[in-house]
Amino acid sequence: MGETGLRPYKLAFLLPGLLTLLAIILFPLLFTIRVSTSGWDAITPELNWVGASNYAQLWGDVRFWQSLARLGGMALGTVLIQYVLGFALALLVWRDVKARRFFRLLFLIPMMTTPVIMSVIWRTIFHESLGPANDFLHLIGLGPYPWLTSGGWAVASVMIVEIWQWTPFMFLLLLAGLISLPREPFLAAAIDGAGPIRTFLNVTFPLMATVSIGAIMIRLIEASKLMETVYVLTSGGPGTATETSGYYIYIKGLRDFDIGYAASLSITYLLIMIVLLTLVGKLLHRALVGGRS
């Protein structure tokens, strides 16, 4: 009875926050959908109705689909490398190693920096003639490489910056998962005479499956919004070699001021990301957890 009597009061306290949250989420989304059905641009700055013409134009926009495919490749590549490196670093400081607290703090420094500022610094590092990257490579008999002036190297440069910036985040999540693992399976493996590699493959990695899926999905969601690094480091160039969906939407909306079309790109991009990330999550669960359930 007491619980039933208190329920209206609980709802009364939760309602203002819930309504505020819904307004913050729903209003921009609904307004963007409305804008996507308008011809709002630099010449016609109004919400006139054009129906689905923006979406019809979108299907033939090769540049958008190329930027989406490019984003997918960069996101999958960077997150995979971040996962491998983050797992390796987490395993390194999980066990009793000297100065492990120092290393834990050291590994987190890149994540604490502002992406835009670090992209400016990395742009200086990758400068073809003045940057220290080519100077260092020259000392070991390599280079120079056109880090920011060649399509393939520019993509590699963006991925290097993303990996450097966000591997600590993956490291932090995976380290938290390793610390929370039960000790009994490891004791049983030691009694069976399992070595480090066998213990990792048969005990550590399977126990970390759910944590791994969560870490990978969080990073994929963030990587799918890749824009700041591209904006500062390469401006989508050379040509459109590093242009991602977010940067292309920025060009259409804030450079060309084709607001209606940019809104339709945003809604399409959102729906595609929801579908793809849902499929990736199911595939990861089936691969890492489904086989043992």
Image: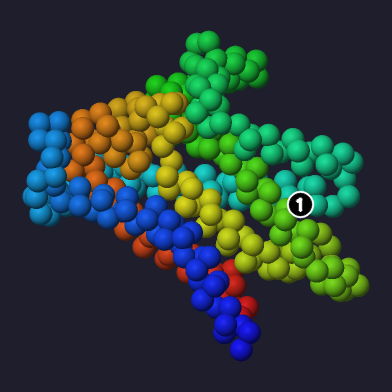
Can you see residue 292?
yes
Q: Nearer the viewer, residue 202 or 261?
A: 261
Query: Percent position (x, y) of residue 180?
Result: 77, 63
Can you see residue 277?
no
Q: Using residue 249 as the reference point, say whether residue 144 is left or right of it.
A: right
Residue positioned 45% across, 26% down in the render: 233
Judge whether 63 appears above or below 116 on screen: below
Judge whether 218 appears above or below 207 on screen: above
Q: Outermost residue toward the bottom?
A: 1
Density class for disc 1 (Cα within 10 Å; few <14, some 14-19, many ≥20) is some
Query: Percent position (x, y) of residue 92?
Result: 78, 47
Q: Using residue 138 as the reference point, say whether residue 77 is left or right of it.
A: left
Residue positioned 84% across, 68% down in the render: 183
**Residue type, label 1:** Leu
Quarter of the image where one finds residue 248: top left
Quarter of the image where one finds residue 26: bottom left
Q: Outermost residue toward the top?
A: 130
Number of numbered tags placed on the structure image = 1
Q: Quadrant of the C terminus?
A: bottom right
Q: Which residue is mark 1?
A: 91
Q: Using residue 172 as the reference point, say whether residue 81 is left or right of it.
A: left
For mark 1, give the secondary structure: helix
